Image (tube, helix red, strand yellow):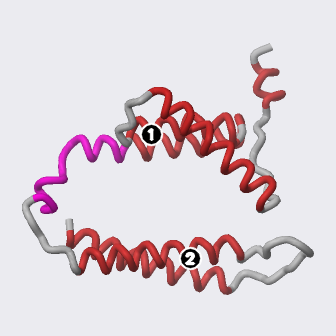
Amino acid sequence: MRRKNIIAAVAIILLTVVYATLTAQLPTRSLPDTPGPTFFPWVNIFLLLVLSISLLISSIFTVKTVENSDEFHEGPRKTKSTVIAFISFILYLILLPSIGFVMATIPFFAAMMVLFSEKRFLQIIIGSITFTVFFYILFRYGFNIFLPTGNWQNLLGAFS
């Protein structure tokens, strides 16, 4: 696992450098009281760099033991969870424009919580609704970014 983490960290750092180069080439426009078009890409770049450098440093200084060896962590359950998470994300992206952010995000968060071993039903419901509402309020009122609302009239009209 240590070698894989080092390779992943270096790959993400290189990807982040490419992303930063492309972001630096974006045109600068400034509207009053709004972040420019490069604001969120630079936030992403900063977060990716911090996390990938942390992964690289922790992987370099990790001592290989039986518990963290590759044989201990690999298995069909991990692969199955990864495939299910990827399919869930693709389904989320497909449904997002048609049913909207709130209606697509609540079941997506719930599915991810179940996939990552949350078993308490109440925690799943409360957590998925709370995080969805938090992110909606953050983007809508904090960043003044409108999230997809969905095409309910078109969707309901198809069933009429």
| Identity of the residue furthest to the top in this view | 160
Task: Name above or below for residue 13 compared with residue 74.
Answer: below
The label nearer to you, 1 versus 2, is 1
Instruction: Look at the image and tell me in which quarter the C terminus lies.
Output: top right
Query: Viewed as shown, does residue 84 lie left or right of 75?
Result: right
Is mark 1 in CB contact (under 8 Å) with mark 2?
no
Report which quarter residue 102 is drawn in: top right
Query: Viewed as shown, does residue 22 lie left or right of 15?
Result: right
Q: According to the image, label 2 marks what residue?
A: 45
Query: Closer to the camera, 123 or 73?
Result: 123
| Identity of the residue furthest to the left in this view | 66
User: Secondary structure under badge 2?
Assistant: helix
Which residue appears at 35% of the width and 38% of the height? 117
Q: According to the image, label 1 marks what residue?
A: 113
Q: Is residue 72 magenta?
A: yes
The picture places residue 121, in percent across and down from the top left corner, at 46, 27
Query: Closer to the camera, 50 or 84?
Result: 50
The picture places residue 13, in percent across and down from the top left corner, at 43, 79
Task: Name above or below for residue 7 compared with residue 106.
Answer: below
Q: Is residue 141 magenta?
A: no
The picture places residue 149, in percent across and down from the top left corner, at 78, 41
Which residue appears at 35% of the width and 79% of the height? 10
Q: Crowding at label 1, few (<14), some or many (≥20) Cα neighbours within 10 Å?
A: some
Which residue appears at 57% of the width and 41% of the height? 92
The picture places residue 26, in percent across and down from the top left corner, at 72, 81
Check residue 94 in the rendering and tell me which mark sits there, or answer none: none
Instruction: Look at the image and tell me in which quarter the N terminus lies.
Output: bottom left
Q: Crowding at label 2, few (<14), some or many (≥20) Cα neighbours within 10 Å?
A: some
Query: Viewed as shown, does residue 135 lie left or right of 160?
Result: left
N-term mark: 1 or 2? 2
Looking at the rendering, the stretch of residues picked out in magenta corresponds to: 67-83
